[in-house]
Amino acid sequence: MAQTPVKVTVTGAAGQIGYALLFRIASGQLLGADVPVTLSLLEIPQAVKAAEGTAMELDDCAFPLLRGIEITDDPNVAFDGANVALLVGAMPRKAGMERGDLLEANGGIFGPQGKAINDHAADDIRVLVVGNPANTNALIAQQHAPDVPAERFTAMTRLDHNRALSQLAAKLQVPVTEIKKMTIWGNHSATQYPDLFHTEVGGKIAAELVDEAWLRDTFIPTVAKRGAAIIEARGASSAASAANAAIDHVYDWVNGTEWTSAAIPSDGSYGVPEGLISSFPVVSRNGKWEIVQGLEIDAFSRERIDASVRELEEERDAVRQLGLI
Ligand SMILES: NC(=O)C1=CN([C@@H]2O[C@H](COP(=O)(O)OP(=O)(O)OC[C@H]3O[C@@H](n4cnc5c(N)ncnc54)[C@H](O)[C@@H]3O)[C@@H](O)[C@H]2O)C=CC1
Ligand SMILES: O=C([O-])CC(=O)C(=O)O
């Protein structure tokens, strides 16, 4: 029997991440090479025409797995029956801004989209928030979707994870595939903590293979500030690498994976207040993210995890003050 296509809704479909993402979804890289999809593209009215242009190009690829494309400026239509929602549509930051500066500008987008997901999405909906500040936008969307299980709302720190893998691989002159158990903790922001104390390279702990000054003064800031470095170099924020990370996140969530990083609602593990959407070491089993348990956290790591979590609490309090949650 023909398989029912999976409906994937992408917001901000006419933006730069959208352009790097849609063709990969349609080619089967988001869910699997045998999973047919329909695409729903949500845009603001002034960008619908550009999204239509992208849809024409998608048609022109004749992707065997792509069973339909819908383009709309109405979230209630876009999320109707959606199985996967990639919330990308939001303003990107410019040179000199921190991601937190986008809180007010972008926060207002995610409440109505959360409500539309609540009211219209399929029962198995999975949501990945990419638009910044991603963790807190995910919290806003989740708070407007009381009927959807809270753990279906996640935010993207996979790009940070992949950046950390690449930086470490270059330092140790090993292929990225040699590196296991990399972790990003906390917020997708400059306070994030890429942790090498549980990372393994050839069976050895990565923190013991590099000197402490490099770890503290080069590795951590390079990973945490990579987004700004890309903006500085490219004149625009990361797009293809962000799309790639979104593909990695959803593919692994649906199909299962060993240790990676994802921002998911805290259950209180590792002292992260319950409910905050914070990055953790995770595995995916049976279509669900699970936090890796039982890790020892030393004082160096504790201080950095706490700082990033404090920032998440401040963002949560700020959006409360703004009446967004
Ligand atoms: N979590 C992460 O690792 C990363 C997050 N980002 C964030 O992703 C977001 C998108 O980045 P780009 O694609 O480069 O931006 P872009 O400006 O190229 O595209 C954004 C698109 O969103 C649309 N949009 C705005 N409001 C919308 C709404 N209410 N509903 C639907 N669509 C809407 C705009 O019309 C535009 O086409 C930014 O917030 C950026 O900071 C970017 C890189 C990495
Ligand atoms: O830094 C930005 O504004 C875009 C982003 O989130 C990233 O590249 O990590």
Image: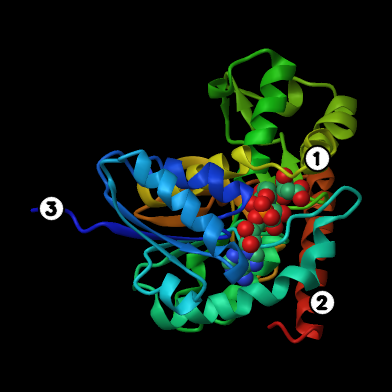
Q: Amino acid at mark 2?
A: Ala
| Residue 132 percent across, percent down from the top left | 71, 59
Q: CA distance from mark 3 to mark 1?
A: 45 Å
| Residue 233 percent across, percent down from the top left | 82, 33
Q: Residue furthest top?
A: 173
Q: Which residue is mark 1?
A: 235
Image vertical order of residue 252 relative to residue 229, above or below: below
Looking at the image, do the residues carrying marks 2 and 3 touch, with CB atoms under 8 Å apart? no
The numbered disc on residue 318 is 2
Q: Amino acid at mark 1?
A: Gly
> Considering only order in the chain, which callout, 2 or 1, is on the residue closer to the N terminus?
1
Tell me which residue sits at (59%, 58%) in the image.
88
Looking at the image, do the residues carrying marks 1 and 2 touch, with CB atoms under 8 Å apart? no
Instruction: Please state if 90 lies on the left or on the right of 13 as rendered.
Output: right
Tell me which residue sits at (66%, 21%) in the image.
169
SS for callout 2: helix
- Please state which of residues 295 and 310 is positioned toward the viewer in this rendering: 310
| Residue 98 percent across, percent down from the top left | 86, 55
SS for callout 1: loop
Image vertical order of residue 242 relative to residue 166, above or below: below
- Please state which of residues 133 and 173 is positioned toward the viewer in this rendering: 133
| Few, some or many residues within 10 Å of mark 3 (<14, 14–19, 20+) | few
Residue 203 position by quadrant: top right
Tell me which residue sits at (58%, 17%) in the image.
175
Residue 11 position by quadrant: bottom right
Instruction: Give the foreground label among 2 and 3.
Output: 3
